[in-house]
Amino acid sequence: MNKKEVIATQSAPAAIGPYSQGIAFDDLVFVSGQLPIDVKTGTMPESYAAQTEQSLKNVQAILEEAGSSLDKALKVTVFLKDMSKFSEINEVYAKFFNENPPARCAVEVSELPKGASVEIEAIAHK
C-alpha cells in the first residue's frame, strides 16, 4: 500500500500556512515552494542571486531530510518577480545543478509571500 509521508526539518523555514515543507510518496519527494529565508537568522537576502541560493539551500535541506538530494531532482519550478533577473538566477542555479540538471520551468509572478523575489519548488526521487 502506498503511503504519504510528511517531510519536516528545522534546517529549512517552517511552512507559513496549511501545507507541509515536503511530501514523500513511494520513491518521489515533492518540496513545497521555498522562500529565501535563512532559518538561522529569519531574514531574507536582498539580491536575486542571494535569494536564489538561499531558496535552493532550503530545498536541499528538505530533500536531504527525505533521503534524497538535489542530484536526484527531476523537476524544478522557479518563481520570480522580475524576468529580467533570469540570467542572474541562472548563474546561481547552475552551481547547484552543474551536471544532468533537472527539467525546469521559470515563471514571472506579480508577488510572492513575505515580499520575496524568488521562490523555488522541486520534485525529486529518493
Image (tube, grey):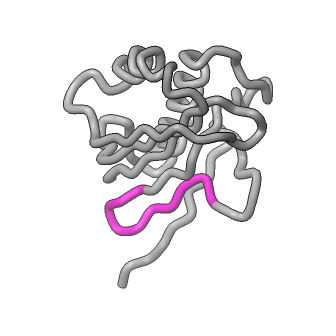
Q: Nearer the viewer, residue 4 or 32?
A: 32
Q: Residue at x 50, y 31 (%)?
A: 56
At which x and y percent is residue 10? 68, 42
Q: How many marks?
A: 0
Residue stretch rendered in magenta on the structure: 20-29
Q: Residue at x 39, y 51 (%)?
A: 123
Task: Give the quadrant of the N terminus.
Answer: bottom left
Q: Residue at x 50, y 51 (%)?
A: 31
Which residue reaches farthest bottom?
1
At which x and y percent is residue 45? 70, 18
Q: Nearer the viewer, residue 41 or 123?
A: 123
Is 43 drawn above or below residue 114 in the view shown? above
Q: Is residue 96 left or right of residue 121?
A: left
Q: Residue at x 63, y 46 (%)?
A: 9
Q: Nearer the viewer, residue 70 or 120?
A: 120
Most frequent secondary structure within the magenta stretch: strand
Q: Is residue 37 left or right of residue 82?
A: right
At which x and y percent is residue 84? 50, 21
Q: Nearer the viewer, residue 81 or 41?
A: 81
